[in-house]
Image (cartoon, rainbow, N blue to C red):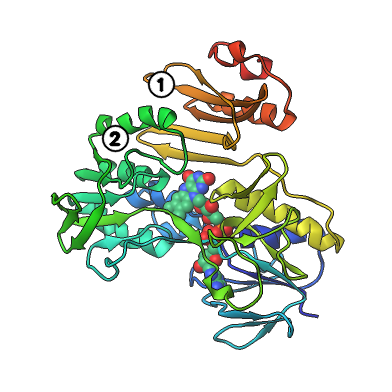
Amino acid sequence: KPGVVIVGAGMAGVQTAVALREQGFAGPVTLLGAEPHQPYDRPPLSKAVLLGKAEEAAFDVAFDVDFEELRIDLRLGTEVTGVRPDAHELDTPAGPVPYEVLVLATGAEPLTLPGTGGVPGVHLLRTLDDAARLRPVLATAPDLVVVGAGWIGAEFATAARGAGCAVTVVEAADRVLVGALPAEVAAPMARWYAEAGATLITGAAVAGIEEGRVRLADGRELAAGAVVVGIGARPATGWLDGTGIERGPDGSITADAYLRTSLPGVYAVGDCSSFPSARYGARLLVHHWDNALQGPRAVAANIVAGEPVQAYDPVPYFWSEQFGRFVQYAGHHGGADTLLWRGDPDAATWSVCWLREGALVALLTVGRPRDLAQGRRLIESAVPVDPARVADPDVPLKSA
Ligand code: FAD
């Protein structure tokens, strides 16, 4: 019997395979990955790996998983090009691969700036190969232009400053982190750029990139020994066209609460898939590491049981390292009615809490990991909190 076949050997795919074994699945497990490398972890790619701290980047970020020992049939360099649900088969350049149960874990692809593909010196940062190309570039400390002031843009700018580059970050929106945080919360974080010696230009669309310079729509030109484009990512689901697997306008596979897709026996997990959150009353598309760790455990439980037994409704979590600060976020502030500051945003450490009908629904912490840990549990418990105590940074959140 063909057993479970997983498409995509990133965090979500690998964790699904591992979770299946941990939960006692004894049948065949096949893991197909397009990249040639041993499966690896992405978060270090925009951090230590870029500065050459790792002796050998590929070795340093590889997952510590013994695929052979776990009887996981790992096939690298195998891009799946199609699904034929009626035949229960996948198409790959090496021929068809049959499946009983299919898990889609193809992650996301970085968005590109139109017209810049193939221009020398323009980089993306998603894969180990991208990072390996950027390391020697950073080592020569060029004038660097980063397009996009999101999480990855800020992390990359941090690494580039660390490498001694002159860094200019260009953002089309009028502020940083526009898709992620409200203006009030993003404002103090925008000041970190100047503090770190990076120039931040907001409200500036890129009109064109030629070798050595970036042209902005307002006519300005920036010298650029290298350009890194970090303007977001989109689920890597284009290859599913014509398969009948439902997707949303954002390109995500629209899974149900058990991470099942619209086709029977087909699951989707990680950056490629969205799910309905009963906790937050919204469909969530989460592009963060913890989601690619937790989601697979639910998928595995449902596969092992052979029926939908475990709904996936997490308190989403992520971290980011920006300009020497450790930023963490838990929850989802979309439906919040109250925002409370915990501490002074100009200080080294502070937090922000979001409440909805008196209960904590999300929090962002800067250098306050204890707030994060306690807040995360408060969100899970959904008990009412005292806003005055939440806003007092000297009161532990767990007793707010
Ligand atoms: P991916 O990691 O994208 O893996 C999907 C894999 O599937 C890829 O290897 C791809 O090649 C393969 N694939 C795609 N299509 C096919 C196909 N048709 N056939 C076969 N294989 C295919 N999150 C945090 O919470 N904190 C951080 O600090 C953080 N830092 C990050 C830094 C960087 C530079 C990046 C890129 C991401 C970062 N993230 C961070 C996000 C986190 O890494 C992702 O959420 C996580 O990698 C998602 O895992 P995934 O397995 O769903 O997708």
> Is 156 above or below relative to 68?
above
In this figure, which residue is indicated by the disc labeled 2? 193
x, y percent for residue 346: 36, 20
- Please state which of residues 312 and 22 is positioned toward the viewer in this rendering: 312
Q: In the image, is 152 to the left or to the right of 67?
A: left
* Quarter of the view holding residue 229: bottom left
Q: Amino acid at mark 2?
A: Tyr
Q: In the image, is 369 to the left or to the right of 46?
A: right
Q: In the image, is 101 to the left or to the right of 215?
A: right
x, y percent for residue 14: 63, 61
Q: Amino acid at mark 1?
A: Pro
> Is 343 above or below relative to 324?
above
Total numbered badges shown on the rendered structure: 2
Q: Are marks 2 and 1 in contact (CB under 8 Å)?
A: no
Instruction: Tell me which label, 2 or 1, sits earlier in the chain.
Output: 2
In this figure, which residue is indicated by the disc labeled 1? 345
Q: Residue at x 41, y 21 (%)?
A: 345
Gap between marks 2 and 1 measured at Cα: 15 Å
Does dot 1 land on a helix, a strand or a loop? loop
Q: Residue at x 28, y 50 (%)?
A: 146
x, y percent for residue 117: 30, 69
The quadrant of the image that shows the C terminus is top right
The quadrant of the image that shows the N terminus is bottom right
Question: Can residue 163 be seen by looking at this rendering?
Answer: no
- Please state which of residues 46 and 336 is positioned toward the viewer in this rendering: 336
> Is 32 above or below relative to 132?
below
Does dot 2 land on a helix, a strand or a loop? helix
- Other-residue count near label 1 (Cα within 10 Å), few / some / many at <14 / 14–19 / ≥20: some
- Please state which of residues 84 and 157 is positioned toward the viewer in this rendering: 84
x, y percent for residue 353: 56, 25
